[in-house]
Image (cartoon, rainbow, N blue to C red):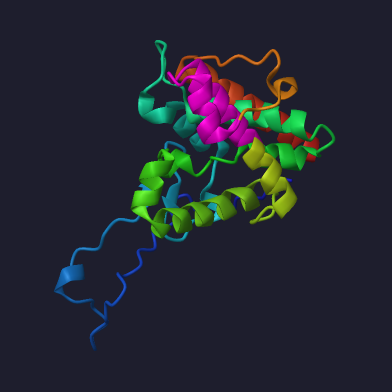
Amino acid sequence: MQLGLSADRGKAACVAPPRGAHLGASGILGDHMAKATRAWQRMLSGRRLDLLDPTPVDVEIEDIARGLAFVARWNGQTVGEHAYSVAEHSLLVETLFRRIAPKSPAKWQMAALLHDAPEYVIGDMISPVKAAVGPGYQALDVRLTAAIHIRFGLPAALPAPIKKQIKKADKISAWMEATQIAGFSEAEATRFFGRPDKALTQDLTITLRAPSETRAAFTQRHNELLGSMD
């Protein structure tokens, strides 16, 4: 079920003051906040997505598909003429999820497809960088995930069993990517991600496509799942 979009496309951004800031009697922040920090990003759809307080009405699949198609996994350190995008990875994870849970309804397949959707605005970070950044990245990811889920008829937070199955698909995809396009030996990839069941990866090969092709494939799969959810 797709939510109706009644909000004005010119919605004003909400910029939160930094922790510890105080308002004076006139209602104006101190000198260090004289110039407000922009906390929203304008999308090509015309939406302004507030990163501090994202709302479902400012989420569009066209923006997600385009953004993910241009975000490279593995920091771009993959073989081939095209970067291996988060959109391509998301399609692989959704395929693997269906193999892990073949009887899952369309809404959980949608959740698998959108598992990295927040990266259309915050980018993809390899795990060591996420650990260095700290809990702030995770908090931002959670807020964006909730807004995206609600926009497309999913619960803000997924049930634990579904989340676990998607994580399993994600780790299998990481092993496949590591060994097929990121230069890892099978032994090294297995040490980090675990060796997947061959039955789950049978006949699956990593593909590298131009961003426009991947964007179209991601959008098409999203629309198919959304139609099934209706």
From the viewer's perspective, tell me whether residue 18 is left or right of residue 138: left
Q: What residue is at 37 percent from the left and 30 percent from the top?
A: 75
Query: Which span of residues is magenta-colored?
Result: 169-194
Q: What residue is at 72 percent from the left and 37 percent from the top?
A: 109
Q: Is residue 33 visible?
A: yes
Location of the C terminus (image quadrant): top right
Q: What residue is at 67 percent from the left and 47 percent from the top?
A: 163
Looking at the picture, does residue 133 appear above or below residue 190?
A: below
From the viewer's perspective, tell me whether residue 103 is left or right of residue 112: right
Q: Is residue 118 magenta?
A: no
Q: Nearer the viewer, residue 30 or 5?
A: 30
Instruction: State the image coordinates of residue 57 (x, y, percent, origin top left).
Output: 56, 52
**Where on the picture, by quarter, is residue 92?**
top right
Q: Is residue 180 magenta?
A: yes
- The main secondary structure of the magenta stretch is helix
Instruction: State the image coordinates of residue 89 (x, y, percent, origin top left).
Output: 55, 28
Q: Is residue 62 visible?
A: no
What residue occupies the far bottom of the structure in this picture?
25
**Where on the picture, by quarter, is residue 31?**
bottom left
Instruction: State the image coordinates of residue 34 (x, y, percent, origin top left).
Output: 18, 68
Q: Nearer the viewer, residue 158 or 204?
A: 204
